[in-house]
Structure formats: C-alpha cells, structure tokens
Amino acid sequence: MPSSTLTVEQPGALALVEDLGRPGFAHLGVSSSGALDRGALALANRLVGNPAGAAALEVVMGGFRARFDAETWFAVAGAWGDLRLDGRRIAPYTAARALPGSVLELGIASRGVRYVLAVRGGLDVPPVLGSRSRDTLAGLGPAPVQAGDALPIGAQPAASVPLLDQEAAFPPPEGPVTLALLPGPRTDWFTDAAHAGLFDGGWRLSEQADRIGARLLGAPLERLVAGELPSEATVPGSVQVAGDGLPTILLADRPVTGGYPVIAVVAASSLDALAQVRPGQAVRFRHA
C-alpha cells in the first residue's frame, strides 16, 4: 500500500506521469519519451528533496485540480500561472506543504505550456521498461490521468526538503524563443536559400504540436534533392522537412525512424525551452 496518494479531481487538457524516460530501447522501436521540460522536472524534484528523475506530473496548460490525502511537500515548475492551495495563492518554483485534504489547483498557464508537479517521494506508479513515463505514440506507461485517479506517492527520500534553492528561476518568455541548431544528417538535401531561410525566417509554432513533434509555420524550405529517403534513425530535436517544405521538430515521443530529410537538430540545451513554446509564439534559430 502506498504511504499516501494524490487524487486527481480535474486533469485539465492533459496530465501525464513522466520521469527521465526510457533511453536505450530504440532497437525495439521504443523512443526515449520522458518529461519534455527536463530542467523543470529536475528543479521541481530538487525543491522537494527527490532524485532529479523521480516521476512527476506533466500538466498541459493547467485547469488541473487534485487533493492530497496526507501531509505532502510538493513543488510546481515549468509553465507559469495561477497556483492555489486551498484557495490561497502560492509561489511557483517553491516547495510548499499540503495538509491532509488540501486541494491544489493549477490555473490556465499564462507563460509556457507544461507545468511539472513534483511530490516528495515521487509518483510510485508501476514502471514499464524501467520508466514510469507515458509514451503517447507507443502507448507505453501509465495512461493519461483521469478524474478520480488516485496516484500513489513513494516513500520519503533520504534528502530533506531544502531550506533555500540557490538557482534563480524565471517564467518562460512571452516573446520570441531562440533555439540553438546543430547541422543535421541531410543538410546537403537543401538549397543554400533553404539554409539561409532556416536561420533568417520568421517561424511560428503551429497548433500541430504535441509530445511527438512540433510543426512550424513559415516560408517553405526548398529541397535540392527531390528523391525519396529511406527511413533513418531520429533523435529528439531532429528538424524534419516534409514534402511541403515546412519543418517539424521531433520530440521525446517521436518515432525512432523517419522518412523525411533532417536539415538540422535542435541542441539538447534548447529542448526545454522548446517544450514551453506556445502555439503562435515566434521561434528563431541560431547556430549552436
């Protein structure tokens, strides 16, 4: 029996259990998955004394409400919005203590997209292939959280709740987000104008964005090679260019292979920022 539970009363648009994922299974067709904003996961866990990769909830856009059945320390990082505990506003990026019966609400995010809610002890759902993450493409891991779900909380970690976190935390930006790009394996499939347009173009995140990929809107990128491409391995951040010339950035739940040429790869250091870009928000690229 778990020592305590978090009962979800309202999951919002989408709430998933995520940890640092399940790397090392690409040969089985299983992607890495895991939290999209890994920095937010590590920060929220650190604030409550958990290991960096303890399982937490990734809540998309807010509209979330849950009740604690026992005294529990928790922290919310990532997206920025109205957070309330028993109706009283609480600070983001700060450890807080809930009492038995306390109700936590994550309002609609005003900055960013994905809240990360960590509870002290982590969410102790059964692991699949060594991870408690939900892979939305493969259907692995715990199902999306529904109203009424009672999520078990693990044993108290050895580390105490820190009195003060030294790292300054800032909300996701409202303006353009700049991402670092590395060369992709098929840069030679594109014209010089396409390469220039990738870095000079005015891109915006489309509504077609989820944990699998994020499609961008802008001027199409012209291909130099028009032939078909056999499927190749992909990594998180791969910038694939479809037949219409528009790029899609593959994310944690991506397919492990893809058939569109990859012109560039978003550097790992920029993936957390990408995870918080809202549909319609401007995206710029720079050389890594």
Image: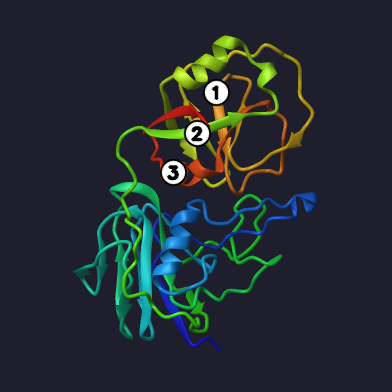
Q: Which residue is mark 3?
A: 273
Query: Dot 1: what SS?
Result: loop
Q: Residues within 10 Å of mark 1 (few under 14, many from 20)?
A: some
- Find the residue positioned furthest to the front: 166
Q: Is residue 128 visible?
A: yes
> Cβ–Cβ below 8 Å for labels 1 and 2?
no
Residue 232, percent from left and from top? 76, 34
Amino acid, disc 2: Ala
Q: Residue at x 54, y 31 (%)?
A: 181
Q: Is residue 3 above or below residue 185?
A: below
Q: Which mark is residue 37?
A: none
- Mark 1 or mark 3: whose residue is earlier in sequence: 1
- Mark 2 or mark 3: whose residue is earlier in sequence: 2
Q: Which residue is mark 1?
A: 246
Q: Which residue is mark 2?
A: 180
- Which is closer to the viewer, label 1 or label 3? 3
Q: Residues within 10 Å of mark 2 (few under 14, many from 20)?
A: some
Amino acid, disc 3: Ala
Q: How many marks?
A: 3
- Find the residue positioned furthest to the left: 88
- Mark 1 or mark 2: whose residue is earlier in sequence: 2
Q: Is residue 276 above or below residue 14?
A: above
Residue 211, percent from left and from top? 54, 47
